[in-house]
Amino acid sequence: MKTVIIGAGLAGLSAAYHLKDNWVILEKESKVGGLAASGQSKGFTFDKTGHLLHMHNPYTKGWLIEGLLKNQMNTHARDSWIHSQNVFTRYPFQANTYGLAPKTLTECVVAFLKTRDKIRKPSADPHFHQWCLETFGRGISKHFMFPYNKKLWLIDLKKMTTEWIRNFVPIPSREEVLYGALVDQKKFFGYNASFYYPKSGGIQALPDAIAGELSGAELYLDTEISEIRWKEKRVVTATGSFSYDWLVNTSPLNLFLGRLSPKMPAALERAGKKALQSTVVYNLNLGITNPRPTPKHWVYFPENKFAFYRIGLSSNFAPNLAPPGTSCFYVEFARWAHQSFNYEKMLNHTLAALRHFGWMRPEDKVVMTHWNRIDPAYVVFTKERRAFLPQAFRFLEANNIISTGRYGAWKYSFMEEAILDGKAAAEKILKS
Ligand SMILES: Cc1cc2nc3c(=O)[nH]c(=O)nc-3n(C[C@H](O)[C@H](O)[C@H](O)COP(=O)(O)OP(=O)(O)OC[C@H]3O[C@@H](n4cnc5c(N)ncnc54)[C@H](O)[C@@H]3O)c2cc1C
């Protein structure tokens, strides 16, 4: 049985690895990795914003950390922060209000404790705004959850559903919140408390290692799928076409559905247009001559006076990502695709902020700037999305198409999940 895989990101590579043979991967870019690919400029290596590897599953840990990439990864304890009201507090905000102005801190803690005393049952299907109020109370919502998430997701939080929250938003206990208001606590919360990062080469080392294990068929780079003739079980590229028994799609679902020929049933097609919304992330990678601006790994910025929502320092994960005597920042801005973005203005805005924080000293110089435009970056969680996806996947699977990975399945997920998605797709095909 022959499988064609669209995309050599982590999901596509993992699907091929687990199929073992009789697969073909078609990838539009000239290297493997997708979102987990790294770039180089002027001696710097950078990812498409920070790409830190969190491993929770014993299978992936055994295969990759203890196997393929053995001795090639460093383990880091997360050192992440929030900057608001001119103060840096530890991540997550909800458990670490220590250091904030007494009025803010009191608002946060008192309202949180009230949510724990509530007599009303939580709403059955709250929108994200409601969920924040019910889970964290007004103070934490007002000072972090609302402004930060509005900046990241762009959408009205009352239109946003909450199924993505799973392991992305830690919920502390009342003792932890109280303790974290009184003490600079160093307890770790959340799914990314520690992470792995390659000792060299950036996160590209991960897809490269998986690609190095592939045999049993062909990986075509620089090969973009332009049309999917699903009735004939054939995909078309600029240079030819490939027939399949099974098709695994890991390219963005909205674009994939747009390439179906003939189109999906009209009602499904209409629903898809409303359901599949996403944001774009503009990622500035910036090399400067300050070798150690701060030991922090990354910082979240909820306030609107900063146009970016997060800044990280990749040279703090792996010093050799930056030449000796320099460091490398990644800066993230969110926009809708139709919005304009002024690169020069945002670069100057970032430099002013780095100087303000003392991360760039008066004598420091910028030695590298590089921009990535990530589109899609975050898929937007709405009721329309939730209603549409099961119908779309039923239609596709009935036609031997599995659409998976972060954008194939149109979800919010991390690298390990993409790898497991590819494995699950392969297992489904092998069992069929
Ligand atoms: C800003 C940001 C930060 C992130 N940070 C982290 C992090 O710190 N840790 C973490 O674990 N995860 C992180 N992630 C998530 C992680 O990047 C993804 O979950 C994972 O890389 C997705 O892999 P994938 O294979 O599903 O998709 P992709 O990597 O998108 O792969 C899809 C592939 O399909 C190819 N393709 C698309 N269209 C076509 C076509 N028509 N023909 C042929 N090929 C095509 C693409 O070029 C791409 O290579 C982050 C994501 C974002 C957006």
Image (tube, rainbow, N blue to C red):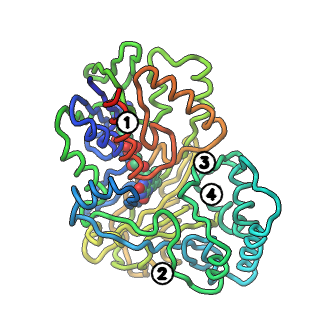
Q: CB under 8 Å between callouts 3 and 4?
A: no
Task: Give the secondary structure at mark 1.
Answer: helix
Which residue is under mark 1?
425
Per the rendering, the mark at residue 163 is 3
Frontmost residue, 166 versus 320: 166
Image point (29%, 69%), residue name: 74
- Residue type (three-letter) at the residue carrying disc 3: Glu
Residue 81, compared with residue 426, is above or below; it is: below
Mark before the other along the chain sequence, 1 or 4: 4
Precedes in sequence: disc 1 or disc 2? 2
Badge 2 amino acid: Gly
State the image coordinates of residue 249 (x, y, percent, origin top left).
39, 32
Give the labeled residue for mark 4: 149
Q: Gap between marks 4 and 2, in whole Å? A: 26 Å
The number of numbered discs placed on residues in the rendered structure image is 4
Look at the numbered disc 3 and give the secondary structure of its residue: loop
Mark 1 and mark 3: span between their CA atoms? Answer: 22 Å
- Labels 1 and 2 touching (C-beta < 8 A): no
Mark 3–mark 2 Cα distance, whole angstroms, equals 39 Å
